[in-house]
Structures are given as structure tokens and as C-alpha cells.
Image (spheres, rainbow, N blue to C red):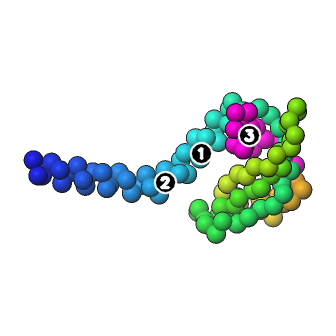
Amino acid sequence: MRGLWQLALIAAIVLAIPAFFFGPAYLRHRQEARVRADGLPATARILRLEDTGSRRNSMPIVDIHLEVTAEGRPPWQASIRRVMSVIEVTTVGPGTVLQVRYDPARPELVAIAP
């Protein structure tokens, strides 16, 4: 019985470590895919780009702060975290207007439209 508990503890640790490090990014990805597929259309103006200091494949992970405008609603602010190439970071900046989709139940959830 003692060996079974040790095995269960080792399995829990082996599963918990990747979930801790990769789980939040995976959940953000799934949430963004859902909003992109089921959300309502809107336009968003970039207010500012903020480098998080993290990198994925040498590309910066950036927080994009937006002012979102949709028909029948007052404008609101939202943020998106994305991996951006250096070229994207230099060509997209404050004032750029993007097509986005948002979750009407939680308008702070915004995804850049495909």
C-alpha cells in the first residue's frame, strides 16, 4: 500500500509541473479560440503595447491594450496577450485599428479577428 501512495504522489508531481507552467497559456489559447469563433464583431484601437519581458522562440510576448467599440455599446478597454514577431511590433502601434471579436457576456474577453 505504501508503494501505491508513493507512485500516486510521483504521478501527481509529474502531471502538476507541466500544468503549472503551460496550463495558463493553454487556457488563454482555448478562450481566445472560443471568442474568435463565437464572439461578436467590433473594432479596436491600440492604445499601447507593453512588453511582458517574456519570450517564446525569441519573439516577445506583448500585452496589447485596446479601446474597443461595438455597435450599441459605449467604448471599453480590454487587453490581449500575444506573441508578436519583431516585424509586427514595429509595424503595429498605438492608433492602429484592428477588427476584433468579443464575448458579449464578458466584454473584456477580446480576440483579434481572423
CA–CA distance in space, label 1 to label 2: 11 Å
Task: Say whether disc 1 or disc 3 marks the residue closer to the N-terminus.
Answer: 1
* Residue denoted by label 1: 29
Q: Are marks 3 and 2 in contact (CB under 8 Å)?
A: no
Mark identifier at residue 22: 2
Dividing the image into 4 quarters, which one contains the C terminus?
top right
Give SS at disc 3.
loop
- Between 2 and 63, the residue placed more toward the observer is 2
In this view, the mark in front (3 or 2): 3
Q: Residue at x 69, y 30 (%)?
A: 38
User: Looking at the image, can residue 81 be seen?
Assistant: yes
Q: Residues within 10 Å of mark 2 (few under 14, many from 20)?
A: few
**Stretch in magenta:** 97-114
Q: Residue at x 35, y 51 (%)?
A: 15
CA–CA distance in space, label 3 to label 2: 25 Å
Give SS at disc 2.
helix
Q: Position of residue 100 (x, y in %)?
A: 78, 41
Task: Say whether disc 1 or disc 2 marks the residue closer to the N-terminus.
Answer: 2
Q: Position of residue 43 (x, y in %)?
A: 85, 42
* Residue denoted by label 3: 107
Task: Say whether disc 3 or disc 2 marks the residue closer to the N-terminus.
Answer: 2
Q: Is residue 20 magenta?
A: no
- With 37 as the anchor, is 25 left or right in this view? left
